[in-house]
Image (cartoon, grey):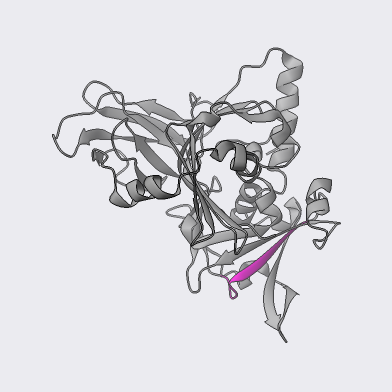
Amino acid sequence: MKLFFVLTALCLFSFSSKSQNYYIVSGKVISTETGQALAGTSVFAQNTTIGTATDAEGNFKLYLPNGGYDLVVTYSGYTTESRRVSTGDEGNKSLLFQLKQKEKEMAEVSVVATTEVKDGWEKYGSFFIDEFIGKTGNSKTSRLKNPEALKFYFSKKRNRLKVLATETLQIENQALGYNIKYSLDSFTHEYATETSLYTGYPLFEEMTATDSMQKGNWMLAREQAYQGSMLHFMRSLYNRNLKDEGFEVQFLVKSNDRQIAVSLKDAYAALHYERDDSSKTVEILPNQTEVGIIFNKEKPAPAFLAANPEEPATFQFSVLSFKPQESIVIEENGYFYDQADLSISAYWTWDKMADLLPYDYHPANH
């Protein structure tokens, strides 16, 4: 089964300026309708543990580790807005967010009226948890604390399941030591193609360890989750140390109605790797749209192989699908854009919310 998903991540906790270089992002949040400042607005850096709230005048300031982020602004009763920020941006200190009041869309009202499944959690709850939180070892100690917030809609005509949430989802991940608040935009599953897509804004908060043993277990579990992950790959690609980190890149091409893997003598040349030292970014534009990623330092999880017996058993194999003639830009923290231009399949789809790490996570040996 092939799955594709888009995941935008946000995390929240205090930043220590002693740990690494950083830059300042500041600005103001106002209401589009009234022009008045919105005090108490949540402002988060995408996929980090860094966030704040606006003051009485609607102002905010964040200290971000060098790299790129989606800065997301949320306020109850208003639409969520996001904007990309980066180390080299000149306008980081004068951002203005104008939030619009939410209005119910007719299409959504129609969906609610005609396709809502009254016993949706009983019918689709387990499936949703498997597709959203995952089926890995870490998912076994992760739980959704407020399943009553989910609304399920099934369209017989489209053979599609859609899931919405009436409030922020609360996820407890005991394996990695995170509490996650996830603002779910939507979750859809197309049964015809067995394809899942979900988008939203998860906010991570580190749990407080009860003792040094629990803290050590969390550090080890995070290190294991990081190894071979997409975050690990993007950072390794940025730093041009793919081989040392255990990655190999291949092109997947069709030949006589079969897809074959082609090894690359120079992966960086084949990917058209270009580094811009002024912006501290790397741009890639592969010669082929289907790119295979091998991680040879770990074997696939036994549960994954049981569910996907046709997949390689001696290494983890994932696929990145690029849009034709569309490049992506990678920041030094592993963040990349435009994320909508890239989809994943094979092993990386095995890791979902229960194995997600924030962009400001760094292993002890890195």
Residue at figure coordinates x 69%, y 49% from the top left: 350
Residue 359 appears in the rendering:
no
Judge whether residue 293 is colored magenta.
yes
Quarter of the view holding residue 223: top right
Q: Residue furthest left?
A: 34
Secondary structure mainly formed by the magenta segment: strand
In front here: 197 or 238? 197
Residue 161 appears in the rendering:
yes
**Horizontal arrangement in the rendering, residue 244 relative to residue 186 (left or right):** right
Q: Please state the horizontal and vertical placement of residue 155, each as a whole percent of the image.
A: 49, 55
Q: Residue furthest bottom?
A: 256
Q: Is residue 151 above or below residue 55?
A: below
Quarter of the view holding residue 26: top left
Highlighted range, magenta:
286-295
Q: Is residue 26 above or below residue 247?
A: above
**In which quadrant is the N terminus drawn?**
bottom right
